Amino acid sequence: MKKIIIFIVLFGVIVVPIIWSLIQKVPEGTSFEGDYHQVSSIDFLADLTYQKEGAVLHELNILTQELDMIEAAQEFILMDMFLFNDAYDRSIMEYPKSVESVTNALIGKKKDNPDMMIVFITDPINGFYGAYEEANIKRMKENGIQVIVTDLDQMKDSNPLFFGYYRSYIKWFGTSGPGWIKNPTDNNKPKVTIRNFLRLLNLKANHRKILVTDQEGMITSANPHDPSSYHSNIAIRLKSEVINDIIEAERTIAAFSGETLPSLEYKQANQNYVPNTKVRYLTEKAIYTRLLECIKATKKGDKIQIGIFYLSEFSVIDALEEAAERGVSIEMIADPNKNAFGVKMNGSPNCQSLSKLGDKWDNFSIKWYNIGDEQYHAKIASFTYPVHNTILMGSANYTRRNMKGYNLESDLEIITVKDSDISKDIQSYFERIWNNEDGEYTVEFNTYVDNSFFKYKLYQIQEFTGICTY
């Protein structure tokens, strides 16, 4: 009997937390798949950092457009941004004050229009998971802006081996209180505790990046985050009733985070629509499903162009291989994952996950973005079919965590004709980078490819288990 009791106790202590973590469900209302809507205007934006004749150049457009949207708003502003802090080591490099610029713009708008609803949704990473309140976010609260910090505990666990024990034995101690460990992001920020680090190891996030107002909306891969200011990113700025779908998807985050999103409605749509163009909003698993559908729909003579920060999800890689076997032309621009905010990395996952793709087919070509000290942070896939183009773009990397409901993500699907302005702009973007037009953007595949058997197996294990940062 004593042995049975011991077994039961050990089973409860060791196994039950893992089972509890495994059966966690994604919050209701996530993996949102909206209806198709027409657009009154749609513009493609890109930030690019590149080299030319030995100099590093920055073309920064997205933040400027976000500030312009904030200024033009009349009735409400809703912003959901993953990274929003100014924490970094200034002894290495000084970055633009992106966070302060957005904070000042939002506060200024609120002061000029006290009755305007301004809501800012973000991730707890910005206060290092409860160690302190980020200064700019605190300023927004003090000036009447509703700030919603996403409750990550409501989201599904990507690694039950750790998360189960965290949920059962650690989370109840909370994350607040005086810290004694140097802040790893910035020596000048408050110190943190072991509990904050353990919360960090949950490795899930509200990774969305959206801005909508009563006038227009933006879906982007860019964080208004000081040390991310020079990253290469993409965005779509548009006027469309799809904005109301975005608002409803954000209402879900507010609700499971214990907050109420006020009544907000986009009403600016008119009948002067861009011809032969429609869009819809996708989040989480809906992005994954649609990406696979688009890849699998391609045939010989079609073309796929991808610009991506992380690509590690097995089914996406398999689908691309099958498309290459069918004779589909594939061009991919990928970040080599060698740099993360000044810290040198080992190239995982891209240098391993893509190692067996780039030289296997003549019709499947991969180039690495020549990143220098920054990141190629885009997430965009363009599909050229016989009579139309489909574009998927936004916040979602092509990884298990980003695409299977563990992170919160935001993407826009665009269906348009080949000769539309948006198609031409996106095609010009890819051609400029691929062909190194008027600058040095990309390097050949063999520059960074890593054929290490050990690293490849390690990547597979990490992707399968979720024990990784991607």
Image: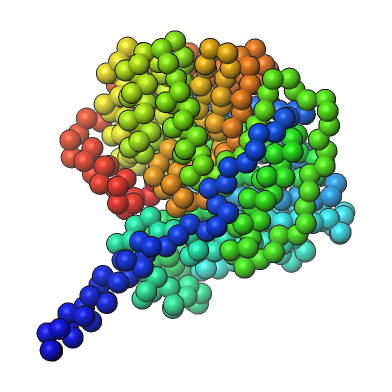
Q: Residue at x 64, y 60 (%)?
A: 254
Displayed quadrant of residue 45:
top right
Which one is in front, 301 or 82? 301
Q: Residue at x 82, y 42 (%)?
A: 267
Answer whether residue 162 is visible to the viewer in this image. Answer: no
Number of marks: 0
Answer whether residue 344 is visible to the viewer in this image. Answer: yes
Q: Pick the quarter of the image with the N terminus.
A: bottom left
Query: 357 above or below 264?
Result: above
Return the x and y of residue 296 as percentages of the image width and height: 42, 26
User: What's the colour scheme?
Assistant: rainbow
Is residue 443 left or right of 91 when viewed as pictured?
left
Q: Residue at x 56, y 27 (%)?
A: 391
Return the x and y of residue 435 as percentages of the image width and height: 48, 13
Displayed quadrant of residue 69:
top right
Q: Residue at x 57, y 20 (%)?
A: 389
Is residue 255 left or right of 446 when viewed as pictured?
right
Return the x and y of residue 253 as percentages of the image width and height: 60, 57
Which residue is outermost to the bottom?
2
Query: 264 above or below 191?
Result: above
Return the x and y of residue 15 as percentages of the image width and height: 26, 70
Is residue 231 left or right of 331 when viewed as pictured?
right
